[in-house]
Amino acid sequence: MASKADEVTRPRKSAAEWVTHRERGSMTLLRIMTFLSLRLGRLGSRPFLHLIAAYFFTFAPTARRHDRAYLRKALGREPTAAERYRHVLSFATTIHDRVYLLRNQFDLFDITIDGEAVVQEAEETGRGAFLMGSHVGSFEMIRAIGRQRPGMRVAMAMYEDNARQINAMLEAINPNAATEVIALGRLDAMLKIQDYLDQGRFVGVLGDRTLGNEASMRVDFLGQPARFPVGAMRAAAIMRRRVIFMIGLYRGRNRYHVAFEMLADFSAVDPRQREAAVKQAITRYAALLEKYLRSDPYNWFNFFDFWRGGNE
């Protein structure tokens, strides 16, 4: 029998908080930073980050409250005002740097990478793999690494509204940087994912947010139960594919660290053990997220009540 810590629940009727709020602040921030970045360059436009971060720090009370609650968990103590401001500034910086990454200006950054062998091994199988990320650090930095690897083709699987926003941003910043997107929620989404994998491609997904109206699993995360979606992991298990954890951490100035770790390999899992293997993989995913948030706490960019519904 499943314990409360790993119980999988059926879809709920209510939408998750992040869906209803749609993170208007981050979209506004991106538009402002794109305008300034393209005209002033990275160094010339960086001073404006402090103005933007100060604005959101002052005039976004709901996000500020959730930010403070998260930092208490990650730091294990009450965060100072300077630490809370640093968190917002890190978020602004990764959005700022996205502009240059999308324009292939990689020489502006000092990038270190761990776990490339995990990706290379998956490439060599010819069966593709799922790349499971999160709203932590810079996802664009991970995609930049992929664009630098000849032959590594990545399609992003995301919900349709998010896909439209992403494509609009890419088109505005660099029309040549458009990526292949699989719109989730459509009837043919799983067939497209299967087709991409059969071609030896990678399919990127973000595994830290649930829409609220889908099956989820309760996991202890940073000392409190939280819900993680199970759909992507179940799809990987049904398709008998590998799942690779990926993360791109911002570490100040122009420094980023990208890490890949094997998360799960469903290629040889007996169908009777599939559900247990999915639960184990989601628990490991949450543990990996927690590990990196303990080491780099200012990379958490979920500015809403992530733990809402964790005790339901």
Image (cartoon, rainbow, N blue to C red):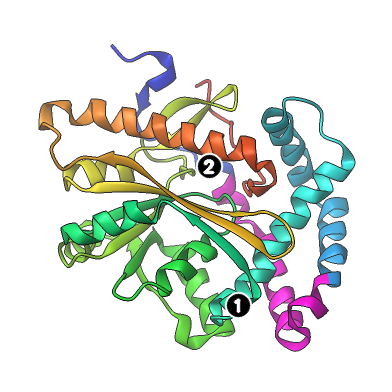
Q: How far across and how far down the image is residue 60, in percent?
A: 80, 51
Labels 2 and 1: the sequence-earlier one: 2
Q: Is residue 266 left or right of residue 117?
A: left
Q: Which residue is mark 2?
A: 16
SS category of the residue bearing label 2: loop
Q: Position of residue 284 (x, y in %)?
A: 40, 32
**Residue 216: in magenta span:** no
Percent x, y of residue 225: 53, 23
Q: Is residue 141 visible?
A: yes
* Position in image of residue 47 (x %, y %): 86, 71
Residue picked out by circle 1: 107
Principal SS element in the magenta part?
helix
Q: In what quadrant of the picture does the N terminus appear?
A: top left
Could one spot residue 127 in this view of the protein? no
What residue is at 60 percent from the left and 77 percent from the top?
A: 107
Q: Amino acid at mark 2?
A: Ala
* Marks 2, 1: nearer the viewer: 1
Residue 46, compared with residue 224, is above or below; it is below
Q: Residue at x 42, y 37 (%)?
A: 285
Residue kind at label 1, given as amino acid type:
Asp
